[in-house]
Image: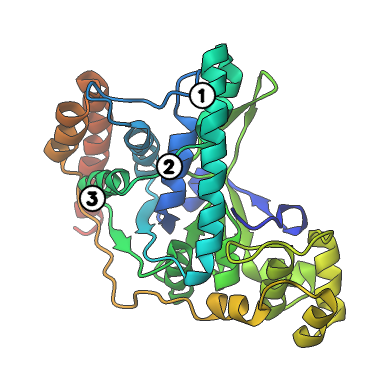
Amino acid sequence: MGLNISQIIPKKEISLDDLKNKVLAVDASQMLYQFLSSIRQPDGTPLMDSKNNITSHLMGISTRIPNLIERNIKLVFVFDGKPPSLKIHEKEQREHRKQLAEEKLEKAREEGDEESMLKYSKQSMRLSFKMSDEAKELIRAFGLPVIQSPSEAEAQCSFMAEKGDAYAVASTDFDSLLYSAPRLVKNITISQRRKVRNTYVKISPELIELKEVLKELDINQDQLIVLAIIIGTDYNDKIPRIGPKNALKLVRQNKNFDSLFKELKPDFDWKKIYAVFKSMPVMKNYQLKWSEPDTEKIKSILVDKHDFSEERVDKMLEKLTKKEKYQKGLSSFLNS
C-alpha cells in the first residue's frame, strides 16, 4: 500500500552521480512489482518468453541494474520474509482487489479496450515465488549480494542503513522512515522519464533524510509512527476523514498517545501496530560481498532459458566487463 505522507515530507532532488560509491539497500520485492507494472505491452500483456513465462521482472533487472552498476552504485537486494500476522487483513484486501481487477480485465478484453486492459492488468498482477527465485538467481549472477529478511524487507534495509552498512534504503515508499532508516532514496530503479497525459516528464532520484523530516515536521520518531498509524499503514486502515496534515497537527498537540486514540476511537489496537514498527525481526548476522558479474550465468538465464536477444545481452555485458577491467586497472595503478 505504501505510506501516504508525500505531501508533508521534505525531499531533495539528486542525481545518480550523487550516489557514486555508496551502498544502497534495495527493497527487492517492491522493485520487482515496479518492473512487472511498467514493463508491458500497450494492451497490458507482460513480456513473456516462448514458453509463456513472464519475463518483465528479468527485463527490468537486466536493463536498470547494469546502469546503476556502471555508475559505481553498490546495490544489495533485500527480499521479504514472513509478513507480520497483522498484515494478513491487508493481504486479503489486496487479493480481493486483484480478483475484481481480473474480472474487469476480462470484460475489457472482450470489448477490445486497450487502455482499460493496461490499467486492470497492472492492478491484477502478482509476484510469484518463482519470479522472486528467478530474480535472486539473476541478481547474484550480476555479483550483487542478496539478503533474505526474516520478515519485512524495508525493516531489514533500514536496520542495515542504521548500522552504517548501507548509505540509504532504496524504495518508492516512505515506510522505511518508520523503521528509523536514516536516509531514503526514491526513484533509482524506475525509468528516468514517465509518460503523463501524452507527454514525457523527467523523473529524478530523491533523497529524504530522517533527521530533516523530523526537524521539518517538528516531531520525534514515535510521533512519526503514530502519525502513520492515523493515516493508515500496511497493518491498519486509515482513520476516516483525517489526512496527513491533520494527523500532523494531532500528534503535535497530543503527546499522550493513549488519550489521542481514545478520542479518535479507531477499530484497531494502535499499540499492536506501534509495536510492529518498533520490534520488527531482522537478520543481524548478514554478509555483504560483491563480485564480478558471471557473464556465462547471466547469458544462460536470459538468452538460453528466457529467449532474450543475445546481441542485446552481449552489449550489456560488454559494457559491464569493460567497467570491471577499468576499475581493476585503476586500483592497481593507485596502489602501486
Q: Quadrant of residue 264?
A: bottom right
Residue at which label 1 appears? 106
Q: Which mark is residue 140?
A: 3
Q: Is residue 253 left or right of residue 232?
A: right
Instruction: Name the residue type under label 3.
Output: Arg
Which element is circle 1 on? helix
The answer to which of 179 and 275 lies nearer the viewer is: 275
Q: Disc 3 vs disc 1: Cβ atoms closer than 8 Å?
A: no
| Res. 333 visible in picture | yes
| Res. 192 visible in picture | no
As measured in the structure, the alpha-carbon distance from the residue carrying label 1 to the one carrying label 2 is: 16 Å
The answer to which of 92 and 228 lies nearer the viewer is: 92
In x, y percent, where is residue 207? 60, 55
Q: Is residue 44 left or right of residue 46?
A: right
The residue at the point 39 percent across, 74 percent down is 282
Circle 2: is it few (<14), some (14-19), or many (20+) Cα within 10 Å? some
